[in-house]
Amino acid sequence: MSTLYWIRRDFRLDDNPALFYALQQNCQHAVFITAYETWQTHNHSGIQIDFIERHLNWFSDQLTKLGIKVSFIECDTFEQQISQLSEFCQENDITSVVANSEPELREKIRDNKAAQRLELTLYDADTILPYGAVLNKQNEMFKVFTPYKKAWVKTLQQHGFNQNYLAAIKQSEENPHQASNITFNYAKQDSSKWPLAHEFMQHVLPRFLNDKVIDYARDRDFPAIKGTSGISPYLTIGAISPKRVLYDLLSYYPHILEDAKAPIFTWLNELIWREFYRNLLLSFPNLNKLHDFQGKFKGFDWPNDHAKFTAWCEAKTGFPIVDAAMRQLKQTGWMHNRLRMIVASFLTKHLLVDWRLGEAFFMQHLIDGDLAANSGGWQWAAGTGCDAQPYFRIFNPITQSEKFDPDGSFIRKYLPELENVPLKYIHQPQTYLNSVGNHSYWPQLVDLKEARLQALDYYQKELNND
Ligand code: FAD
């Protein structure tokens, strides 16, 4: 009898139950199987795939030290993955396969199909509390975040969380070390500015927990300040376990769960948003197909002005905070959360472009692109989602800019053409630039007041048509 460990988004030695059980069964084989076409259909960005490739190579080295031989199989689709996996099992006399589960619908369908052909055992490891552990009185998933959060904290206080696999699996130095050199045949974008997860855990996270988490509630909305953790790419690809993160947070702040209103709780609150969105995907499968959460938006006819969408994508809207944010996304593969909210609101409200177009563009560029959090964030901004910002609340990009980039330093960093614009004009530089005969920046794409009224009117009309 022989067991195969199927590597997916779980490139880590701690909190990896599939690997743990594979080793208990003397597993000698692991496999990673690509799905290039499916990755493309899912809009996985080149920078995320590069980041995965780097982690896969690191992880393969670690598995070699555990006496596990890693095979790399290239496929285009999930269907092909299943056939190749079956063939691999037959050729290597493998009788059972273990893997960590993935909550997305298409991945689940693939796993169900695989389970019809193979003995496949799945373990849940990508949330702190198990899927479905936090339900309302009717035993259903919550549709609003705050009561979910309260129930989440209560469950954690009453039952704790599973720490059985948190100790990192020990490797033997006797096994031959062989540097792995796996290369994906995908249009990749360099991710090397992001250290590997084990370096992040050694240097970056402890610094954040030690120095910054205490001021997170104060600093997190200012894109010019490094006030957030930067952990999202690692959580997204499973290179860091969310349980490990909570474990470390509790070791610094053992009483953090006692007062959910305290500023120190704010960062944990964000990790709970992550759990909320992942559970929603499972409870409401249509969210995986990017259906509007609120039924009343069914048939909503988005005007989708192509020229306006293109200007947004190309950072040419003439609103510095929006354009600087879009440049941050394209240059670094990441965007600050406050800016994600601003640009998403601007696209769906002021420009009346379908949130799904923005969602896809984000996925194509983000290193942390994740179906649950991304579609959740977009639906929140568009007003179509579960616990969304109501459609009539519309962020003004200029007042947001004045509030969250008060000295314009973020704008100047990503829009060097505005470097010499005096602070007084930085959030709305056109009048000043015209007065000095400088035509290096774009005119405003829309009149904000008009576009706001138009959006309110349009949303109202479309929703009444329903
Ligand atoms: P921190 O502020 O340090 O937060 C810690 C962790 O909490 C994050 O890494 C993330 O895992 C989680 N988290 C924080 N905010 C949220 C949130 N609103 N929803 C769910 N989880 C959250 N996050 C993604 O991981 N992938 C995405 O594709 C994504 N797309 C988004 C799209 C829009 C329109 C919006 C408004 C938000 C999106 N977010 C997404 C959530 C959030 O912007 C990022 O998680 C955050 O900016 C990542 O930076 P950080 O790791 O420094 O976060």
Image: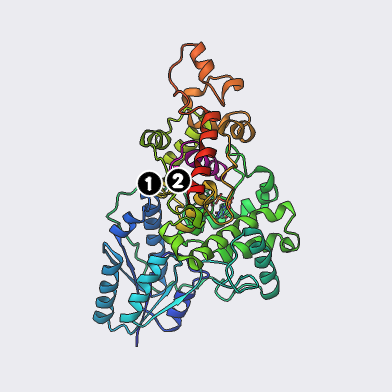
Query: Is residue 373 in view?
Result: no
Residue 308 at x, y = what percent?
A: 40, 34
Residue 26 at x, y = what percent?
A: 40, 83
- Spatial separation of the CA atoms under disc 1 and disc 2: 8 Å
In terms of secondary structure, where does tag 2 sit? loop
> Measured along the vertical axis of the image, is residue 463 above or below residue 21?
above
> Measured along the vertical axis of the image, is residue 294 above or below residue 400?
below
- Nearer to the camera, 332 or 92: 332
Residue in the picture at 48% in, 48% down: 465
Q: Return the residue at label 1.
A: 190
Number of callouts in the render? 2
Judged from this view, the residue extending furthest toward the top is: 436
Mark 2 belongs to which amino acid?
A: Lys
Q: Are marks 1 and 2 in contact (CB under 8 Å)?
A: yes
Residue 253 at x, y = what percent?
A: 71, 60
Q: Is residue 434 left or right of residue 79?
A: right
- Nearer to the camera, 22 or 233: 233
Whether residue 228 appears in magenta in the rendering, the answer is no
Q: Which mark is residue 193?
A: 2
Whether residue 343 appears in magenta in the rendering, the answer is yes
Mark 1 belongs to which amino acid?
A: Asp
Judged from this view, the residue extending furthest toward the front is: 465
Q: What stretch is highlighted in magenta?
A: 332-353
Query: Is residue 211 in view?
Result: yes
In terms of secondary structure, where does tag 1 sit? loop
Residue in the picture at 66% in, 59% down: 146
